Image (spheres, rainbow, N blue to C red):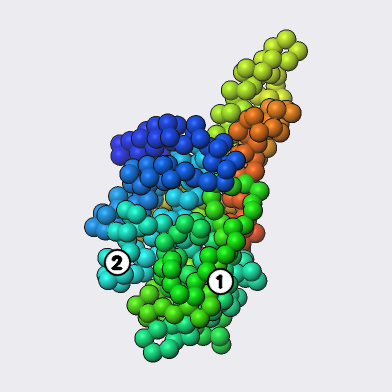
């Protein structure tokens, strides 16, 4: 067993930390307050290949392995969870499924654009179908060489600026999950409307929108994989996405620990730094230990993915644990800051709001438990494993 990162993964960490500390951290508060990632930062993220992380080199990406991807996501998130999720959704659930399930023609058409100048989004959730993804009702009806789509999507991360959407619709109303098909829909397609931006508690710099489809006609060539295979495309994409969210949670937790440690050393009460009180020391010890446990689970899931092994339940365990740790660590960090932690003067207030979403999106903690328990109770039927 080897717990060391490779030289290349260590380099990725160093380079990304420098980038995140230099370009993202100084404006992370402004990104949150203005609910916008400035164009200048989006450009720099592109120039530094962060939008090509999971795109094969043959299509203009940098194709980092999953362990390297975790390292990058943790570092970006340590500076800004909003920036990290923008990059994560684009890579793992937009470019990822195209790279994995696309035909050669589809990959050559979209992946170089996603690596260089287009933004991707993932549209699965609907107003009445969240955790029960197989219940989605957006319809896609074949009409000659086209599909006609009608329906509504919500909680679409990146949707405000996305150039293309990996979108799921029902092609067969009789079959539940086997009646779902994946499509790639380009912004500007007639009948596709980008709706209102959702006002969120945290990760406010990351845009989340509603979409509507009204007689949206797209050529058959925009279908990803076969008719009826969409649920598998969604689930396998989410397995990878959940590793990205676990890494995002790690970054928030790590930032919380560092902020709490700095404050505990600097803040004097009762004539000494509060770091000298055991109540504070124990909180710091628990944060550190839990973060390390979550990090090991996250690296394990990523490592399994790199080996091509089934890793769905491992991705769920990593996300379940890391998201709970992020919320706990952000909560302790606010506690250690006392009243100051409840103000916008300190980043821990943002970490606290940002942490919560990691227990919700790309599958709530309850859904992760379903995937994990299925893998224990029904180990042979492949449920929850990719
Ligand atoms: N990889 C590949 N196939 C998978 C899979 C995975 N990770 N998970 C399930 N499947 C397959 C199953 O093997 C089964 O295949 P069959 O066609 O052979 O029957 C099929 O998908 C249905 O599986 P299951 O019965 O477990 O599906 P459910 O409808 O019960 O749903 C959960 C399973 C709850 C795990 C799924 O709906 C889910 O992940 N929901 C959360 C959705 C989510 O994360 N949304 C957030 C979107 S981003 S904000």
Q: Position of residue 368 (x, y in %)?
A: 59, 58
Q: Position of residue 160 (x, y in %)?
A: 51, 58
Residue that protrudes farthest toward the top in the picture: 271
Q: Quadrant of the N terminus?
A: top left
Q: Is residue 29 above or below residue 358?
A: above
Q: What residue sits 65% from the left and 43% below the top?
A: 353
Give the labeled residue for mark 1: 212
Look at the numbered disc 1 and give the secondary structure of its residue.
strand
**In the displayed structure, does residue 44 sit left or right of residue 157?**
left
Q: Secondary structure at mark 2?
A: helix
**Residue 377 position by quadrant:** bottom right
The residue identified by callout 2 is 109
Cα separation, mark 1 vs mark 2, equals 25 Å
Judged left or right of residue 56, residue 206 is: right
Seen in the picture, residue 253 relative to 215 is either above or below; the reply is above
Q: Nearer the viewer, residue 62 or 303?
A: 62
| Image position, residue 134 (x, y; %) | 57, 74
Q: Is residue 335 left or right of residue 151?
A: right
Residue at screen point 27% across, 65% down: 108
């Amino acid at each position: 067993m080897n717990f060391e990162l490779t030289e290349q993964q260590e380099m990725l960490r160093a380079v990304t930390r420098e980038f995140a500390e230099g370009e993202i951290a100084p404006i992370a508060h402004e990104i949150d307050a203005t609910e916008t990632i400035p164009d200048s930062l989006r450009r720099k993220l592109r120039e530094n290949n962060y939008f090509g992380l999971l795109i094969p080199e043959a299509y203009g990406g940098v194709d980092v392995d999953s362990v390297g991807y975790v390292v990058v996501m943790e570092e970006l998130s340590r500076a800004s969870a909003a920036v990290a999720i923008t990059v994560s959704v684009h890579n793992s659930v937009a470019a990822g499924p195209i790279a994995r399930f696309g035909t050669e023609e589809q990959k050559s058409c979209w992946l170089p654009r996603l690596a260089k100048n287009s933004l991707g989004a993932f549209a699965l959730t609907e107003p009445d179908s969240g955790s029960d993804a197989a219940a989605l009702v957006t319809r896609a009806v074949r009409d000659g060489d086209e599909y006609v789509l009608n329906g509504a999507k919500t909680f679409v991360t990146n949707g405000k600026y996305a150039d293309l959407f990996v979108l799921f619709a029902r092609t067969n109303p009789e079959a539940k999950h086997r009646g779902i098909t994946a499509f790639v829909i380009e912004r500007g397609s007639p009948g596709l409307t980008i709706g209102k931006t959702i006002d969120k508690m945290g990760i406010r710099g990351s845009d989340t929108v509603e979409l509507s489809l009204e007689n949206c006609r797209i050529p058959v060539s925009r279908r990803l994989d076969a008719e009826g295979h969409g649920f598998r495309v969604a689930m396998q994409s989410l397995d990878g996405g959940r590793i990205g969210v676990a890494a995002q949670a790690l970054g928030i937790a790590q930032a919380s620990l560092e902020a709490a440690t700095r404050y505990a050393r600097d803040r004097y009460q009762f004539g000494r730094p509060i770091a000298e009180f055991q109540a504070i020391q124990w909180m710091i010890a628990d944060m550190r230990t839990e973060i390390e446990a979550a990090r090991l689970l996250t690296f394990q899931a990523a490592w399994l993915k790199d080996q091509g092994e089934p890793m769905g339940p491992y991705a769920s365990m990593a996300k379940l644990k890391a998201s709970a740790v992020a919320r706990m660590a952000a909560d302790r960090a606010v506690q250690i800051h006392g009243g100051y932690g409840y103000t916008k003067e300190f980043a821990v207030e943002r970490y606290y709001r940002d942490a919560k979403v990691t227990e919700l999106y790309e599958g709530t903690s309850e859904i992760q438990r379903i995937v994990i328990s299925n893998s224990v109770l029904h180990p042979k039927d492949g449920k929850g494993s990719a």
